[in-house]
Structure formats: structure tokens, C-alpha cells
Image (cartoon, helix red, strand yellow):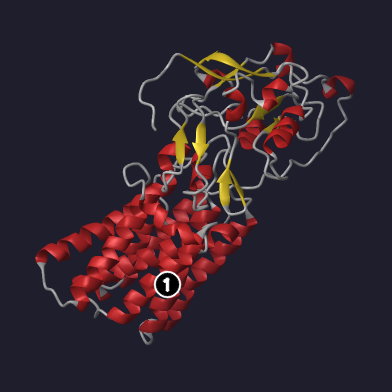
Amino acid sequence: MERVAIKSQSKGFIFDPNRCVGCQACVLACQFENKTELPYNWRSVYKSNSFTQSQIPLFYLSLACNHCEFAPCMKGCPTNAYSRDLQTDAVLIDSRKCMGCSYCSWLCPYDAPKMQNGLMQKCHYCEHRLKEDQKPACALNCPVGALDYREIELQDHKQIPFFIETGIKPKIEIKALNENRKKPEMDMHAVSNTLEIDIPEAEIKEKIQLKDEWPLALFSFITAVLVGYYFSCLAGNIPFYPIPFFVAALAGFGVSLLHLGKPGRAFHSILNFKHSWLSREIIFYILFFGIMAFGYFVDIRSVFLLVLSIVLGLLCLVSADLLYSKTGTSKKIFFHSGGTVFIALFVFLISFPDLLILVVLAKNLIYLIRKLFFVKKNDQKLMNLTVIKLFFAIVIPVIAYPSNMLIVIASLLISELLDRFEFYLELRIMTPEKRMKESNH
């Protein structure tokens, strides 16, 4: 059940980074109490200085689920698997409803939900202990008193540089760092002006990776292409081929199931239309292709069905793009040339023979502007993909045009698929580990 009123006081975790020594006792206590399996810890201890380098301050942050007042996991879960316990105020997951889509993990800025055996799991406050008036195991077993559970003030964490503040009212109170903890223990420059230490930064694994999310990338690409193709048919630019169209729609939906930890529960994805953009995307997708199939195979000519199919197609594209704009990205995505709306628009416009060259040049100009000004230049994987993408977007079409338009269109679609893949490669979701790293720069 979603909370509306904001409470000034509530019970929750309290953490003092000035006391924490990074001993991991809280993590072990959670493991023993809840019988979690490595490496799926519900609580994690993050270190500000990965290599204990002497020029950088060293402190720790112990985090689990903060059972936020406005929990994004609960609001965004497409299956309504999350709820709040009225007695303990804990945000809980019902494993019987979860389908393992991982979307709650993308929404959570504290990296609390963890995928294990195809289902999402996370800290539940040790609710069985709370109901017996006992503290959660992690708070009870902290040997230095850095972590506790008691009545707290719901504070504004914006003054805590190493903590992510998104306005969702996490149930955690964090003590400010003492001034002496903000400084290195020893200034190496005072020891030797000529001494240089070059320690490589620890690599941080991105939460969304193309190797894991390629089914979603392919599904959303197929959706965009089919919607763009349908609009092209309505404009009278190209003929409509129903069998390949509906086969591709079914194939796209089937591919999307490969992303789920529990594909058999995919029907649960439509249960949270009110709040979840993932639910909306799936519902609009089903309605769009369902109404088209009904209208075509039953042979009904209706202006209402025509207008409805157009609206549903647009809503499906918008939902797919808003799905990612609501995640905890380090940079909000205002536009991306690999967005589903852009891809559908491109497919629609290239169906106009007189606009083909202009549209291809314009789309690739937008792509290059994004690559030059909004993407890190040191990402070799992305740079290599850029070369391949432009090869299919420009080189092959120039060679094949206008003698073989089928090759031109196929090459352009491959280039758009690569752009969609780049969309996923460039997603950077903010995590506590990243925030800790940034706080030292």
C-alpha cells in the first residue's frame, strides 16, 4: 500500500560513518539471520577508498533496503509484488507475484533488490524480529555502534555527499562526517614531492548491461520498427504484409520473455498499469497488435479502430522510452537517437522516396552530435560500435543506392539496431558504489 502523508518521524536505520570500520559484521549477521546465499547479500558495506590510498579519505557506508516512504520499487513494480507491512513499516516482496524482471533494481538508488534464483529479494527489516520487539540482526550485531535501528528523523540527505538523495524519503539517518574524516590520514606530498603513486581505479560493474538485457533491446527495436512500418503503410508509401507483421510481433514478445527470471509469470506484468511504465508498455503492446489482428482477420473497416491503433502505437513507443527515464540514471536521458520514438520516426520517414537521403543524413547527424558531446570518449567498446554503425548507416547505402533498395533498407535497419544497442550500453544507473567514488573527486 502506498503512503501519501510524509511523517517527520519514523523508525529506521541510523548509521554513523565516523564509527564504522568496515568489518562486515552487519553483512554477516544478515546472512546468518536470513540464510542468504553469497554473493546476493541484502546488506553491503561500501568503501570510499578502494585501494586504501593515503591521499584519499577513507570511510564506509553500510546500506541495505531503506524502506523508503515513497519507495520507487513498490511504485514501479509491474506485478504489484511489493507491499508495505502496516505493523513494521517494512517494504516487502511477495515472491509469488515476482516475475524477475529486475526493473525494481533499476529504480532503486540504493541497489537493494537482488536477483536470486530468478526472483528479486531484499532486506525486509528482519520483520520477524521487529514483531518480537527486537532489532534487525545487522543493527544488533554491529560491534562499534555504527549501525542501529530506532526512532529517527526523516532528514534531507543532500548534505551527505556520499549518499544518493532522490526525494523518496529513505528510512535512514546518516551522521555527518567529522572534518578529520574528510581528509586523508597522511598527505603523501608532505612526505615526498617526487613520490607518485599510480593506482588504477577499481572497475565498477554497470547495473544494466547489454549482454544481459539484449532481449529487451531486441524487443523494443522490433516494436519501434513495426509501429513505424504500420504508419508507413497508413501513409500509402508501402504495402502491408500481415503475416510477416504479426509473426514479427509474436517473435518480439517471445524474445522479451528471455529477460525474465520467471517467464511463466509474464502475465503478472499488466497488474500495475496505474503506476508502472513497464505495465503500460506491455498493455499498450498487446492492445496495439491485438486490435490490428482483430481488424485485419475479422475484416472490419472502422475509423475508430484505425484511430485507436494509431494512438496505441504511439503510447507503446512513449511508454518504452519513459520506462528508462524513470530509472536512477546518473544523467537523465532527454533524447537518444536510439530511442524507440526516434527509430519508429526514422522507419516512417525513410518510406518517403523523396526524403530518404535527407532523413538518413539528418538521423546520422543527430547520432554524431550525441556521440561527440554526450558520450565518454574513452569507452572503446562504444567507439568500435560507432564505426560499425556508420558503416551500415552510410557506406553500404551509398554503394547500393538506388540500384538495390532492399539492401539499403536492410542496412539502415541494422544501423538502427546497433543504435538501440548503444542506448543500453550508455545507460549509467547511479549506485552507492559510484556515489562513494564520486564523493572523492
| Count of numbered circles in the view | 1
> For numbered disc 1, what is the local secondary structure?
helix
- Residue at x-position 25% and y-position 78%: 238
Q: Quadrant of residue 178?
A: top right
Q: Is residue 184 above or below residue 28?
A: above
User: Identity of the amino acid at label 1?
Assistant: Ala
Quarter-of-image position of residue 1: top left
Q: Position of residue 199 (x, y in %)?
A: 80, 39
Pointer 1 residue: 251
Q: Give residue 364's position: percent from left, percent from top.
A: 42, 62
In this rendering, is residue 287 above or below 99?
below
State the residue in front, 398 or 288: 288
Horizontal side, residue 157 vs residue 63: left or right: left
Image quadrant in which the C terminus is located? top right
> Residue at image x 36%, y 70%?
249
Position of residue 434 in the picture relative to residue 348 (left or right): right
Horizontal side of 381 relative to 423 (left or right) equals: right
Percent of width and height locating residue 151 = 55, 13
- Give the residue at x 75% y 33%: 28
Q: Nearer the viewer, residue 288 or 417?
A: 288
As rendered, which of 408 and 155 lies closer to the eye?
Answer: 155
Coordinates of residue 220 in the picture (x, y in percent): 42, 61
When the figure is inspected, residue 418 is found, relative to residue 300, above or below; the finding is: above
Q: Is residue 122 visible?
A: yes
Residue located farthest toward the bottom when viewing the structure as drawn: 403
Q: Residues within 10 Å of mark 1 (few under 14, many from 20)?
A: few
Q: Is residue 80 left or right of residue 33?
A: left
Using the image as rendered, state which of residue 256 and residue 229 is in the foreground.
256
Q: Residue, x 59% and y 47% (percent of image)?
A: 207
Res 236 seen here: no
Residue that extends furthest to the front in the rendered view of this protein: 132
